[in-house]
Amino acid sequence: MEIKELLKPEVMLLDLKATTKETVIDEMIASLASHGYVTDSAMFKKDILAREAQTSTGLGDGIAMPHAKNAAVKEPVVLFAKSKAGVDYAALDNKPVQLFFMIAAPEGANDSHLEALAGLSKYLLQDGFKAKLLAADTPEAVTTLFSTPLTETATLTNAEHYLVAVTACTTGIAHTYMAEEALKKQATEMGVGIKVETNGARGVDNKLTAADIAKADAVIVAADKKVEMARFNGKQMVQVPVAHAIREPEKLINEALSGNAKVFHSDEAPAANDENAQSLGQKFYKHLMGGVSAMLPFVVGGGILIALAFLIDQSMGVPQSQLANLGVYHPLAAYFKNIGGVAFGFMLPVLAGFIANSIADRPGLVAGFVAGSMASTGLAFGKLDTAGATIGSLSANAIPSGFLGALVGGFLAGGVVLLLKKLFAGLPKSLDGIKAILIYPLLGTFITGFLMLFINIPMGDFNKALSGFLNGLSGSSALLLGLVVGGMMAIDLGGPINKAAYIFATGTLASTVAHGGSIVMAACMAGGMVPPLATTVAVLLFRNKFDKDERQAGITNIVMGFSFITEGSIPFAASDPARAIPSFMIGAAVAGGLTGLAGIKLMAPHGGIFVLALTSDPLIYLLFIIIGAIVSGLLFGILKKAK
């Protein structure tokens, strides 16, 4: 498949009316939706904005490529749009953007579609191609330009200097291949040989061999996600985000050839998304999110099914004498409870396993899974089971150390496997296969499991105390916790602080769902729903302080807010952070605090208004969210300067 087959004339916008980044996105999504290529605009926009929050897709030189792979996309399509005046799109070179390519790929996009999207990057870097696009005034003229055969960039094979590079972005659709083409083109102009490996949505292409790496003077890694790094041990390396390779390929090549680049050692595990090694806190957050992102689907799926089981039993009625069996009393409820329980049971092993995987790659996975499972069961030295007996000196029914135990266990497992890698680094390379499939899994699992027997004791006691505190929350303690958690959800609107609050809240579900749900989870969701709703309130009450595009975005945010998509408020916060963020925080804290004070509980980890029935008091809960939104909206509107 060729790129011209994905450029649909009917969706092209050759005279964009929008004047801001978000309204440009809205106008393009509206065109895709009106022609049936996107079935759920809000769902697709959420992923588009999430990608923008990582790194702007305004690549520089007047080009932007917003993109997402999403279940709301019916078939792959590339929307071309052009702004005659240019739009401030927060591009990487801080210059206005005139040419837009919105790439919409379904979750199951096949290799032929992805090959075509990779070809788009090559066209855009052809000399003079941008000028021709700016001059094109009909969809047919645009399609004709992309029908012209590509002139492949010829790489030098006998140059004096030779480099290898790896490019990778989080979605693997646009930046990956733009960076590849930019590096190849620049290297050819400089008389430097280069081979570029791409880690994109279609997998690893042009994979570097051991001979390629050995031959290279240095390595360039331009990546926003984890790539295979150990193979570059001992080579001089330049590490940058993928966007740098698009913007400044000449600088990267010169730095790589300068002889001053840092020598990479595989046991250092430097970050793939920063020019320098990350701080300890940044590494911790990266590894934690590696586990949390893998865990959340299990929490959401299993948690909602379990919550529905309680709801079914409550609605169908359970005798007073059978309240202990609430959630499994009626057969239908039991089905939901059992299925949800299976999914929920994977939560802690997956959390610990993928934390360890992020730290130590695949060898850490098995040790992490074992640590998470032990945290779930509470297996420990010197603990009695519920019958007062022991299994040897162990108990399989001790106090589970839960979410916190699994979190500690994941980092422990990753550290153990990293240590083993150092200890066995001197073994012959011929034994690499044995190390990966025997030594690391065997010793890593044994050592991690043995240490968890001790760790589970204090962590289990702490988890029991925390569970008791959460289940007994009322009055001032619940008010304070609700204020803090609600406010945290609005500080960075989907960033690390927001995620920390959400992770803590979801971690309370396992121990509270049998008691009607978690107050902390309810406060967390209430706080997260407030910022987008606050923008709706602000644009309705203070119309003169917002332009037309902002008013439209604010109205749209009512859907984002009630869907618990906090990121919907990011454009407002980005354009006026000094007034927006404090306003959002105060309203979110009010909503969370009122929720805590009233002792409202929630059994679902996500869903917004759609899981309102799973709260202990739906109408009051909704009222508190609206109060928080009104408080935030009024503050934001009062503080904001008129346009």
Image (spheres, rainbow, N blue to C red):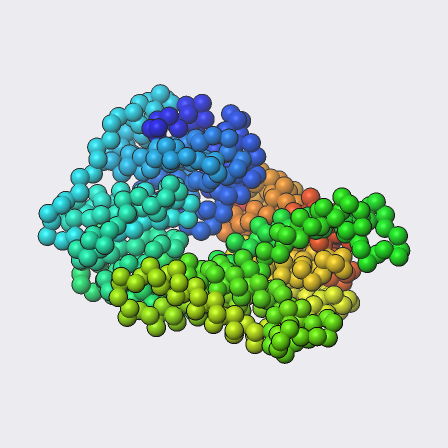
Q: Can you give x and y, in whole percent of width and height, for residue 144 in the image?
A: 31, 23
Indicate the quadrant containing the N terminus: top left, top right, bottom left or bottom right: top left
Asked if 277 appears above or below 317 in the picture, the reply is below
Numbered label tally:
0
Residue at the image point whose x is 37% and y is 61% from the top: 436
Image side of residue 73 versus residue 419, left or right:
right
As drawn, 313 above or below 379:
above
- Quadrant in which residue 437 is drawn: bottom left
Residue ID at (27%, 32%): 129
Quarter the C terminus occupies: top right
Residue 489 image offset from top left, x and y in percent: 60, 58
Left or right: where 64 falls relative to 512: left
Residue at the spot 38% in from the left edge and 70% down from the top edge: 420
Q: Name the outermost residue toward the right.
A: 320
The spot of residue 419 in percent (x, y) is: 39, 71
Residue in the foreground of this view, choosing between 430 and 589? 430
Q: Which residue lies furthest to the front in this view?
A: 392
Left or right position of 408 against 605? left
Relative to 254, is 609 on the left or the right?
A: right
Quadrant of residue 174 within the rendered picture: top left
The residue depicted at 51 percent of the width and 25 percent of the height is 35
Percent of width and height locating residue 614: 74, 49
Towards the viewer: 468 or 534: 468
Can residue 534 be seen here? The reply is no
In this picture, is 643 found above or below 579? above
* Residue 101 visible from this viewpoint: yes
Occupied quadrant, residue 137: top left
